[in-house]
Image (cartoon, grey):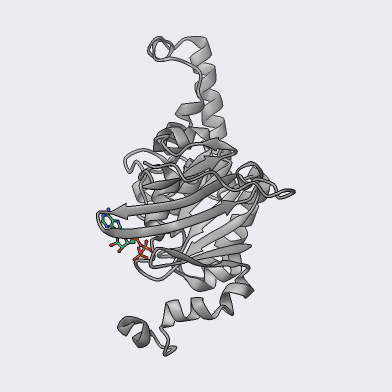
Amino acid sequence: MTQAPPRPETAGTPDPVDVNALYADHITIRFGGLVAVNDVSFAIPPRSVVSLIGPNGAGKTTFFNVLTGLYEPTEGAVFLEGRDITVVPPHRRAAMGLARTFQNIRLFNLMTAEENVMVAMHSHLRSGIMSTVLRLPGQRREEREARDAARELLEFVGIGKAEGELARNLSYGDQRRLEVARALALRPKILLLDEPTAGMNPQESELFNQFVYRVRDEKDLSVLLIEHDMSVIMKVSERITVLDRGNLIAEGTPDDIRNNQQVIEAYLGKTGTREGRRRA
Ligand SMILES: Nc1ncnc2c1ncn2[C@@H]1O[C@H](COP(=O)(O)OP(=O)(O)OP(=O)(O)O)[C@@H](O)[C@H]1O
């Protein structure tokens, strides 16, 4: 990996590394000869709800994988609350406050909802393996506290009644909520949601909107969404970043993005139709 050149100091302008919850600085990712992400800088301010969008093949998933630590960038660096995490592996990033959900739900199907959340709390529990085996009083107290905290989180995401259900028996919408509860068990500063409304009906998508803001406000964190559903994106996001063929082509409020000619062309092609994009 090659580190990006130092950012030029601009008098009076705060360093984006210091002021953002997360800052990805001049990220480039090459797969052989293909440049999947080309020199993209991206910020997640504290307590914000931001989105990353772009047509198929734009580089969204690749970029997301750099943020979560699945990929190391060819060039550039990622900072979490001012700390360089570029080479920190995904599980450690999660423990440091960068939690995520998955496009394809990944729960422990044969565990209950409550157990799924408790497993995620593991990184915050203090007891070691010996006290667990011996069931020492401290360990029992910690387990009880973890169980209470898990129940509270299940209540918070609206599936309190399902605590004893096996994850695989929950409805699709409830499995998505459980995923969020599990991510919140890490007490994250940033919650990354990968296609969170995929498979939801319009009514569920509408509720999701309110849910995102409740999570942001009550858990005091930032949310980044990668989402295909434009109506969700436009309603939920404070700011939107648009990638096209690996390049950052626009960044702004939903209104800025809706009216941006380059974005319209990226989605629809120069002729203004989907056909135009396919031919482009
Ligand atoms: N592991 C990989 N090896 C080689 N090429 C890859 C790899 N992952 C992604 N690419 C390529 O990088 C480019 C960006 O892909 P990416 O999946 O990040 O786009 P995307 O915006 O998430 O698209 P979609 O919305 O279709 O999922 C594509 O040309 C893709 O084929």
Q: Farthest residue toward the right?
A: 12
Residue at 51%, 49% in the rendered image = 25
Residue at 33%, 59% in the rendered image = 35
Q: Nearer the viewer, residue 272 or 37?
A: 37
Ligand 1 quarter of the rendering: bottom left
176 lies left or right of 104: right
Q: Is residue 261 above or below residue 175?
A: below
Residue 274 visible in the shown view: yes
244 lies left or right of 211: left
Residue at 44%, 77% in the rendered image = 266
Residue at 57%, 73% in the rendered image = 257
Q: Quadrant of the C terminus?
A: bottom left
Give the x, y percent position of residue 183. Answer: 49, 42
Give the x, y percent position of residue 160. Answer: 54, 45
Q: Is residue 140 above or below residue 18?
A: above
Q: Nearer the viewer, residue 43 or 173?
A: 43
